[in-house]
Image: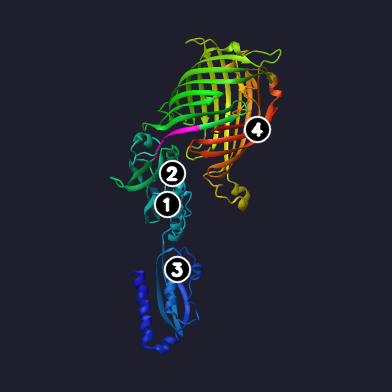
């Protein structure tokens, strides 16, 4: 006879007794309360949950609650009640049937974690009486372990107990087909290569969310939505990835100003998803004292199997540049440079944080129209014109987070540039330098609390501390002018004329604090320090500047305005893109 039936019969009997002799029933008193059937669970612990007490009137509602309370302790498979007449009242005995002592716990269906990893989060141990309430919490902790690591579809399908042996069956759903739809221009393979989860993999929501972020950051789509449908095989789910494409080509008009070169302006045509292949095509020109024309075609995606590559040509004419010697302006000159290049590279197979890229570069440089010479001027420039052919190798290690829209992480790069007297080259030298970049995002409300309770300081647009360090040298006593390390200007030492410091070696450090005010507007404080020269003495005479700037995110790109204080005069720069 099961627990519920016994309890019901007992209560009906006493109900009948109450009805037949209400006067007698009203005087029934509880004379004893006991428990039997328990072996390992202490009786006082059990009776501590019971409301029915000796010396009090018998209450059938209390009896019913007592049975439920004992059962909810979790140690018993059944709980019954026996009533017997005693002199002057009624005795109450709760009859329990203990769960078995746990002998072992085993899991099946788990492939993500080993069995010992799952047992670590379970409090129930062999040798203890099985408690269904405790074990339910244990299973919640197992589920939480999966969920915390992104395996949100994993579920516990069944639990069975046989003579103290507990068997837990886990189902780890796998990915069926990944169906991509909505892309009219972008090739399906360009989208699918960003989704690293493949058919047959266990679904991980964290990884998948990151991969969708990387896909969105490509800039090809206005919207990306996800759906799930049951797969063709049991315990599989098909992923439906729907994209809404946006225009990826643009024509940009830019105007720039620098204290060195005055005003400039130009037009650029750019398509970041040419023919839906994920390639970047660009052609443009800029007019002014710095006149430039260029065309390039790039396939930027690389992994351990896929090569990235680029090809391009350019012509640059820089009018009335300054030539410095020992930090003193010697004369003004015009520079003409034209060239072509081709590069290719990919990631190393063992670790995708490592990559290499090789570029073949041919250029022709000339210097002319020298004027405004100072008395006794030094000329170590105009004789260095000519043709130059180099192979440039970059070895990089990057921990930049590809799944967020801002810079976060560390990049180290080693550069080797070798000039050859072949293919028309007139020079032979080797340059080598190291560059380190670090980007650390943080959120002001985490530091200052409500003082910076502004929507702009969110996880999407944090404050970023960015720093760059360069050091380089060469094997030549005197490098050609166009190949020398050169510091000064908007991309190195902002408080000095471009090419103020030149030589066969250099050292440079830049630091910026980039503070967002709104989603499209931020302010920047910066500090630059470095020098270049032909001997080690320049290390003891480092030049520095500091300043501030603003950044405005426009349809043409990130507009950069910097005001630098350093050197002989303050300098102002107006251009596009971050310095590093």
Q: Which mark is residue 104?
A: 1
User: N-terminal of the two: label 2 or label 4?
Assistant: 2
* Nearest to the observer: residue 219 or residue 265: 265
Main SS, magenta region, reads strand
User: N-terminal of the two: label 1 or label 3?
Assistant: 3
Q: Residue furthest left?
A: 232
Q: CA distance from mark 2 to mark 3?
A: 46 Å
Q: Is residue 281 left or right of residue 395?
A: left
Image quadrant of residue 333? top right
**Label 4 vs label 3, nearer the camera:** 4
Q: Secondary structure at mark 4?
A: strand
User: N-terminal of the two: label 2 or label 3?
Assistant: 3
Q: CA distance from mark 1 to mark 3?
A: 25 Å
Percent position of residue 434, x then y: 58, 25
Q: Is residue 197 above or below residue 119?
A: above
Badge 1 crowding class, 10 Å Cα cut-off, few under 14, some 14 to 19, many 20 or more, is some
Q: What span is in magenta?
A: 246-253
| Residue occupying image coordinates x 67% and y 33% | 546
- Reading the image, the residue beneath label 2 is 209
The answer to the question of whether label 4 and label 3 lie on touching residues, with beta carbons closer than 8 A, is no
* Nearest to the observer: residue 264 or residue 162: 264
Q: Is residue 417 left or right of residue 65?
A: right
Q: Locate the C terminus by quadrant.
A: top right
Q: Locate the N terminus by quadrant.
A: bottom left
Q: Which mark is residue 89?
A: none
Badge 4 crowding class, 10 Å Cα cut-off, few under 14, some 14 to 19, many 20 or more, is many
């Amino acid at each position: 006879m099961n627990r519920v039936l016994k309890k019901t019969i007992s209560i009906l009997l006493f109900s009948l007794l109450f009805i037949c002799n209400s006067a007698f029933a009203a005087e029934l008193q509880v004379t004893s309360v006991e428990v039997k059937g328990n072996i390992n669970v202490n009786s006082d612990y059990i009776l501590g949950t019971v409301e029915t007490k000796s010396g009090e009137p018998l209450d059938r509602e209390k009896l019913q609650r007592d049975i439920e309370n004992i059962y909810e302790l979790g140690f018993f498979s059944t709980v019954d009640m026996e009533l017997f007449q005693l002199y002057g009242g009624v005795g109450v005995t709760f009859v329990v049937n203990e769960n078995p002592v746990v002998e072992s716990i085993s899991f099946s269906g788990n492939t993500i974690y080993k069995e010992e990893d799952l047992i670590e989060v379970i409090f129930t141990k062999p040798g203890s009486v099985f408690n269904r309430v405790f074990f339910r919490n244990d299973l919640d902790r197992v589920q939480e372990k999966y969920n915390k690591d992104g395996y949100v579809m994993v579920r516990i399908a069944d639990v069975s107990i046989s003579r103290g042996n507990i068997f837990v069956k886990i189902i780890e759903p796998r990915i069926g087909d990944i169906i991509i739809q909505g892309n009219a221009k972008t090739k399906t393979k360009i989208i699918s290569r960003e989704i690293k989860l493949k058919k047959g993999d266990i679904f991980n929501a964290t990884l998948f969310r990151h991969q969708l972020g990387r896909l969105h950051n490509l800039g090809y789509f206005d919207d990306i939505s996800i759906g799930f449908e049951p797969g063709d095989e049991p315990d599989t789910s098909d992923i439906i990835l729907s994209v809404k494409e946006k225009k990826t080509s643009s024509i940009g008009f830019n105007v720039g100003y620098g204290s060195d070169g005055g005003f400039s302006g130009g037009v650029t045509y750019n398509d970041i998803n040419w023919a839906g292949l994920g390639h970047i095509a660009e052609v443009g020109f800029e007019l002014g004292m710095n006149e430039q024309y260029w065309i390039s075609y790039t396939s930027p995606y690389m992994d351990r199997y896929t090569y990235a590559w680029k090809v391009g040509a350019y012509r640059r004419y820089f009018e009335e540049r300054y030539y410095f010697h020992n930090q003193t302006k010697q004369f003004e000159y015009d520079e003409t440079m034209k060239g072509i290049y081709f590069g290719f590279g990919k990631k190393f197979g063992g670790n995708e944080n490592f990559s290499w890229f090789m570029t073949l570069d041919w250029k022709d440089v000339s210097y002319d129209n020298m004027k405004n010479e100072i008395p006794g001027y030094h000329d170590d420039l105009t004789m260095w014109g000519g043709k130059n052919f180099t192979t440039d190798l970059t070895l990089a290690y990057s921990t930049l987070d590809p799944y967020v829209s801002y810079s976060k992480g560390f990049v180290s790069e080693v550069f080797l540039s070798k000039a050859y007297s072949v293919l028309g080259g007139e020079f032979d030298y080797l340059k080598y330098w190291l560059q380190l970049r670090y980007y650390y995002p943080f959120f002001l409300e985490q530091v200052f609390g409500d003082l910076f309770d502004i929507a702009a300081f969110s996880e999407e647009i944090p404050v970023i501390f960015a720093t760059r360090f360069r050091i380089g040298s060469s094997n030549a006593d005197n490098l050609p002018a166009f190949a020398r390390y050169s510091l000064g200007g908007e991309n190195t030492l902002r408080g000095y004329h471009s090419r103020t410091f030149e030589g066969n070696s250099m050292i440079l450090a830049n630091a910026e604090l980039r503070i967002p005010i709104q989603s499209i507007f931020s302010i920047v404080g910066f500090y630059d320090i470095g020098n270049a020269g032909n001997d080690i003495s320049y290390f003891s005479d480092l030049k520095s500047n500091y300043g501030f700037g603003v950044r405005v995110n426009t349809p043409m790109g990130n507009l950069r305005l910097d005001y630098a204080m350093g050197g002989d005069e303050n300098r102002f720069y107006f251009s596009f893109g971050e310095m590093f």
